[in-house]
Image: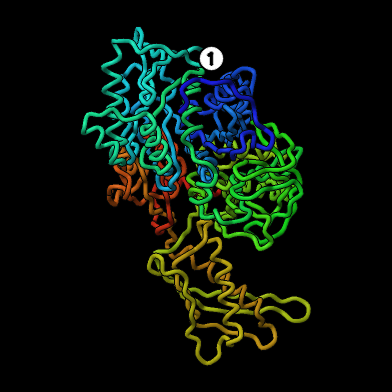
Amino acid sequence: MGQSDGPRGTTGAGSGQTSGRSTRCIALIGPFLSGKTSLLEAILARTGGIARAGAVADGSSVGDASPEARDHGMSVQLNIADVSFLGDTFTFIDCPGSIEFQYEGAAALTACDAAVVVSEPDPKRVPALQVILKQLEDRGIPHLLFLNKIDACETPMLEIVPALQPASTKPLVLRQIPIWENGVATGFIDLALERAFLFRKDAPSEMVEIKAADLEGEKEARYHMLEQLADYDDALMEKLLSDLAPEKELVFADLSREFEDGLICPVLLGSAQNGSGILRLLKAIRHEVPFVGATAKRLKVENAKSAAYVMKTLYTGHGGKLSIARVLTGDLADGATMTGGKAVEERVAGLFSLKGEETVKRSGAHAGDTVALGRLDSVRTGDTISTEKAGIVQIAGVKPPEPVLASGIGLKDRKDEVKLSSAMAKLIEDDPSLAIEHNQDTHQVLLKGQGEMHLRVAFERLSRKYGVVVERQKRQVPYKETIRGSVEIRGRHKKQSGGHGQFGDVVISIAPQPRGAGFAFGDTITGGVVPKQYIPSVEIGVTDYMKHGPLGFQVVDIAVTLTDGSFHTVDSSDMAFRQAGRLAMSEGMPKCQPVLLEPVMAVEITVPSDATARVNGMIPQRRGQILGFDARDGWPGWDVVSAHIPESEIEDLIVELRSATSGVGTYTARFDHLAELTGRLADQVLVSHGEAAE
């Protein structure tokens, strides 16, 4: 870290090689409303990228410029901007904080050199921080913690950091302590530099002498920092044991090495809203974040002549499809021929830098640069692309999380069906954490996503971006029906008109099967009373009827046996026996005590342990059965609750779950079995189904 603030930088939207060193890519990631977009704004203002910092609240920020982000006051997609600072260039990627949009950041993190985790200095943030930090730790991505809104903090920092430590399996190494004046943080002491700085609103901090009243606290905090670093450096440990002051060069070297190796998580302080602590953060990033070569090595493409990772796909109104990619090795030029994951060669139609919603044309890109590539139609988010004709081994990306909420899609104009299909394909390519399902049981088209806001934004994009006006519909539950009783019944289809008539005559027995056994058809025909060639047609007639039983739902778990019948040598046909089988079912099934069946899901709910009791209370309220709970493997302080819950009761489970867990709880659900539904609830289903049919 440098010894002075140094000159202010300028934006670097060009080649990204102002200093001869590669551009580094930094993700800004953190819990919802922690101030990441404000931090990006403060960084742009401090480096000269914009004349003055805008504000998210009044819609004047570079990031969150899309109509959906503005309308909802939150990040719903990546915000990307290039800056130059003290001769080095950086790409900052502001990732959405809401868990509903976190896949955006998860995909981008793959090719980033490091992450700045932004959070308020509040112990209540531990569960949300743990979700983020564990992802970074598991993926080997160097990261530091920036405690934002320090000006509003009233708790001593030496208490805050230990309270946040459960969120990280790596030591949280406090790099700065605040200077307090009348209960307000007015500056900080840099523990590595052993210098004090006073905040100045929207300006570089002013270096001052450390006050005598702060010296004791500074020495205690610095020694603790050195002890943490010494756990990974025997030479530093020896100096501490010998009461020798370590050289600052050794301290800085340890901070850089242990950060890059993922052994520690440094902690810095500031206020993005006031532009405080931004310069120190930038200097820490400049001196300690590794270059793209280390990232290429982590991703095992360091020996490739040409490799770039696609972290985001974007459809723009004027420029068509853009693939946002980080160049890991080699160079790229506009017009270059690229090969992606599908081994298809395509030519780059335009190469751009990004700053928020703005694109800036450029002629080329080098290793380290993050650029937007025009119209690579076969390339998808998560693909590794190369100028090599043979392509390249694909970097392992992150799979989208499983959807937790679904909504039916209704078209206001049936003529838009083809348009909707194209729009949905683009929408899901833009955001792979969305999914579309054509439900075979309910014949409903479902859009599935990560929560209520996620789906709301998706529907808004369909209308605004793609011009398809759709209506959200309630998701239909795929109820079934079966029988409790048995019957033997005759079905005769006889019709006479000019020429050949139609004649089919069958006797069938209908009986219930064990739950989950499915449908069985057989015959006990002797003496040819029903010719063999017509028996399959009887089965077809039976299965035709089973699509809609006496209650109006698909019939399951029954056995039908053809026991008798008769035929006519001239008038019998496949169609006649098919009709006879269907008639026998329609007359016999209502006499077999039909009963409604509802799908029951095997659900695994994942929550912080302090919310487990609340979750256990939710399940019976949703007619669920708790099967048990256990500690979540590899997640200290988390539980997994297992339960059986009717599918009809799961629709808004995620909303209640997120409310009870400060936004971090989630679940997975799989169909487990069908269970009988009787009484008032069954009556309600039948009434609503009848009204829908009308």
Closer to the camera in the image, 408 or 543: 408
Q: Answer yes or no: is residue 128 visible.
A: no
At numbered mark 1, what does the secondary structure look like: helix, strand or loop?
strand
Furthest toward the bottom, the residue is 527
Look at the image and tell me whether residue 123 can be seen: yes
In the displayed structure, would residue 90 be above or below residue 328? above
Q: Residue 636 in the image: x percent, y percent?
A: 29, 43
Q: Where is mark 1, residue-wise?
A: 203
In this image, 209 relative to 230: left or right?
Answer: right
CA neighbours of label 1 inside 10 A, class few (<14), some (14 to 19), many (20+): some
In the displayed structure, would residue 325 be above or below residue 550?
above
657 vs 587: above or below: above
Percent from the top left, x then y, of residue 347? 75, 52
139 vs 47, nearest the viewer: 47
Q: Residue at x 62, y 22 (%)?
A: 48
- Residue 506 vs residue 207: left or right? right
Q: Position of residue 55 (x, y in %)?
A: 57, 19
Q: Residue at x 47, y 65 (%)?
A: 556
Q: Position of residue 63 (x, y in %)?
A: 60, 28
The outermost residue toward the right is: 498
